[in-house]
Image (tube, rainbow, N blue to C red):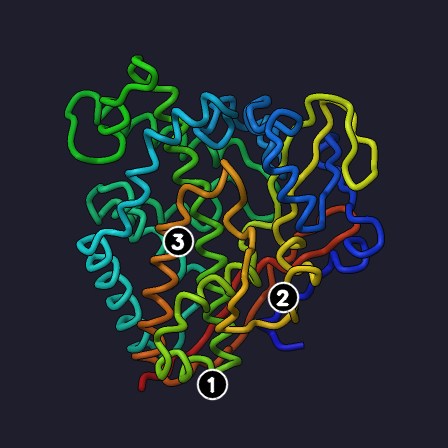
Amino acid sequence: MKKSMLSDPFEKARENIGYGNMDDQGDPVTMLLRLKDVRKTAHNWKTFQSGATPGRIVVPSEVNIRDVRQIPFEVDPPEHTDYRKLVEPWFKRPLEKEYQAKLTQQINDIIDEVLQLDSVEVVEEFSLKLQSRALTLLLNVPYEEAKTWIDWGTHVFRSEGVALDGDKANILYDYIDEQIERADKAPSDDLYSVLLAAEVNGKKMTKEEVKGVMILTFAGGRDTVINAVTNSIAYFAEHPESLQRLKDEPEITGNAVEEFIRYFSPLTHMGRVVTEDTQVCEHAAKANSRVSLCWASANRDPKTFENPNDIVLDRKINPHVGFGFSHHNCLGATHARQILNILISTLANKVQSIDIVECQENVETLGEFKRKVGYDSIRVQFHPR
């Protein structure tokens, strides 16, 4: 199997029973593996809630490292609808031409940088930089802030060999607290200031609510964007003909973005807490237990996707759940799509080929399953056109 390929460890369990089991710090999780079950469960917020104890719907659970509720991620309707209505216009800004022009310049700059190097370690020296620099646009803060975020490393909540690290998480929380206080004293046109001035149902947002939005913004789009970018570059390294095709057929770039998100599924799964005794996949689920919506498995479901284990750049029918589903569809999806769209277009126009020098895979252990998410490190050589 090529280095850039991601296997489907859920195939047998998805076909035979539709679910899997894993232990998460003593709080078990039933993983839903079929697309129809994932979509149905994601839509049923009354039985499968997001507004549980802060951090509990995340897998691995973050209940031991935070008590701030991420908004609107950990809120259910009708409150979720109110928060979403407030923040959604801000997160749609990547559709604006000025935003896209700035993002295009950032991506052109970083590709020009690596084309001058003998080799580059993609995770730390390319994907993390790209993600952090692009985040300055999403937050509307000075470009220089990216250096602070790059210095944190790739993982916000983890240290090497440690699933969750409260001390490392506090670096992010303390930083956000400082930025909220700064914006409170000297408002500007950044996201912190906009949220502090905002009202939900006639009440000004509290600083804790603002912090909840900001934690989600930082954490939700970090590892996922890094994984998507890194996996895309690894794929192009082993499929130079795809780079050429995208140069020759730029009209399929949007399809390619959706296909990469489906195939790579940068976030494996997300949890829900069961509110009442019920069944999932003909399997009993007790109240206050946890299930997870396994996006990565659902996106390989052969009942929906023809040739699910192949990347089909111009796939026409692609109802993937790589950005979630239903009312909790990823807020940052527009930003992520623009990053990948511009990145792919720029690579196709500027890069002839990419060689993988060495790599170390990032493999998640999920109970009975082991899933390659991407890479802990991958060094490549970029060759210009």
Q: Amino acid at mark 2?
A: Leu
Closer to us: 110 or 168: 110
Residue at image point 30% right, 13% down: 202
| Mark 2, secondary structure of its residue | loop
| Mark 3, secondary structure of its residue | helix
Q: Say which label, 2 or 3, has the lower sequence index.
A: 2
Q: Residues within 10 Å of mark 2 (few under 14, many from 20)?
A: some
Which residue position is annotated with label 1?
Answer: 241
Q: Position of residue 61 (x, y in %)?
A: 62, 33
The residue mark sitting in front, 2 or 3, is 3
Using the rendered view, name the quadrant where residue 345 is placed: bottom left
Which residue position is annotated with label 2?
Answer: 6
Q: Amino acid at mark 3?
A: Ala
Which residue position is annotated with label 3?
Answer: 336
Using the rendered view, name the quadrant where residue 30 is placed: top right
| Mark 1, secondary structure of its residue | helix
The N terminus, quarter of image: bottom right
Q: CA distance from mark 2 to mark 3?
A: 20 Å
177 above or below 331? above
Q: Is residue 28 left or right of residue 227?
A: right
Q: Say which label, 1 or 2, has the lower sequence index.
A: 2
